[in-house]
Image (cartoon, rainbow, N blue to C red):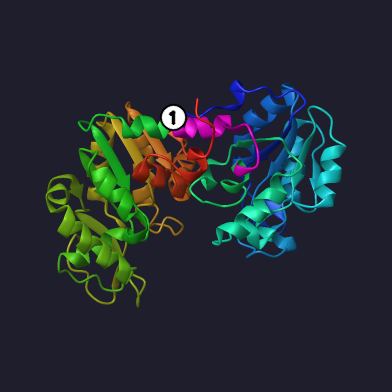
Amino acid sequence: MNRKTVAEVELSGRKVLTRVDFNVPLENGKIADETRIVAALETINYLRENGGKVILCSHLGRPKGKPDPAQSLAPCAQALAAHLGSPVRFVPDCIGPVVAEAVEEMVAGDVILLENTRFHPGEEAKDEAEMLAFAEQLAAPADMYVNDAFGSSHRKHASVYGVTRFLSPCVAGFLVEREVSALSRLLAAPQQGFVAVLGGAKVADKIGTIKSLLGKVETLLIGGAMSWAFLKAQGHEIGRSLFFPESLEAVNDLLRTMHDAVATKLRNPVDIVAKNMETGEIKVLPWGDIAEPWAGKDIGPETAAQYAEIIRKAETVFWNGPMGKFEEKPFDEGTLAIAKAMGDCPGFNVVGGGDSVAAVTQMGQADRIDHVSTGGGASLEFIEFGTLPGVEVLDER
């Protein structure tokens, strides 16, 4: 970690704009999972205990640049207050006089939470001038900045990237520090004994990460719907399996540019669990042609056993993405088998991505994982590029 953290700057009396990731799942206006709020507590408590005036900001959902009461952060203020054991004032906007007034009334140790930054188009604006104009308004009431939203740090958005133009110092929170340190350790790991497991739907979404990992790992295990693109690229039929044309283009590009690495390091499934999309019948098929009207839904039991054995022997292992249609039984079994193996692995193990994290939690393995990343997409981009825009703009040590 070559960026300064909150532990290295003076906080007493400072108005600290703190970007957190409170992009929590909401069901009927209530928070279904408070994991991301809990993950921010260490930094928030440190800021309070050291005399900071804590101005929290975050996005939630995709309101497309205009207010949407269904995606308000108000429930997060209530949940955070319960965890802190002290009041958290919710401010119904994130810029303007209402924020300035709330900040002016703060004393050391106070916490306020601003409304969803994505209620304003400037937060995600592709035009840099528009983005920076909003960032300047967001930064105006504060005099320093902390980024503790690793899951958003791959985006050049106003609250993650732009505000650093207007505030100083700009440092990392403890969550960002942990994420960067763990993922940097992955990137520095010896190739021998380094195993990566990638699943999910689209190869195209992860092609950069796949190319990066193929240059670093001993073995790359592929599962999930992305594996059908590899099957199709080898000239096989895939029936009604989930498939995206851009994924085939990505696989063909990979085969052209990294053929030797693919041949020696990349492992496809040896069997699959398939469903007859007309009768509903489910059966295990060998890896190969998938006839109509069948669709591949999960890695098969033999693949799960082989992958699990490789993972258990790994010295370093990184997993991102489900092995099948995880949300539908019995197509969660491949993913759960990988989750169990991750917990059993005595080496340094890192898990990222919503379904992967859910699987290790469901299998009671989360406490046996060295690092559970809060940012699926951000962790993939860090693996690909070795850093993230929202980290690069923080002050160097």
* Mark 1: amino acid: Ser
Residue shown at 15% from the left, 64% from the top? 234
Q: Quadrant of residue 206?
A: bottom left
Residue shown at 26% from the left, 67% from the top? 248
Residue shown at 78% from the left, 40% from the top? 112
Which residue is denoted by mark 1 in the rendering? 181
Q: From where the camera sits, is residue 343 visible?
A: no
Q: Is residue 262 magenta?
A: no
Could you tell whether 124 is left or right of 232 in the image?
right
Q: From where the camera sits, is residue 104 visible?
A: yes
Tally the numbered discs: 1
Q: Nearer the viewer, residue 390 or 383?
A: 390
Q: Nearer the viewer, residue 108 or 228?
A: 108
Residue 289 in picture, x, y percent from top left: 18, 68
Residue 63 in picture, x, y percent from top left: 65, 63
Residue shown at 32% from the left, 35% from the top? 317
Could you tell whether 354 is left or right of 104 in the image?
left
Residue 318 in picture, x, y percent from top left: 34, 39
Q: Nearer the viewer, residue 390 or 196?
A: 390
Q: Residues within 10 Å of mark 1 (few under 14, many from 20)?
A: some
Q: Quadrant of the N terminus?
A: top left
Residue 297 in picture, x, y percent from top left: 34, 62
Q: Nearer the viewer, residue 236 or 124?
A: 124
Q: Which residues are magenta?
A: 165-181
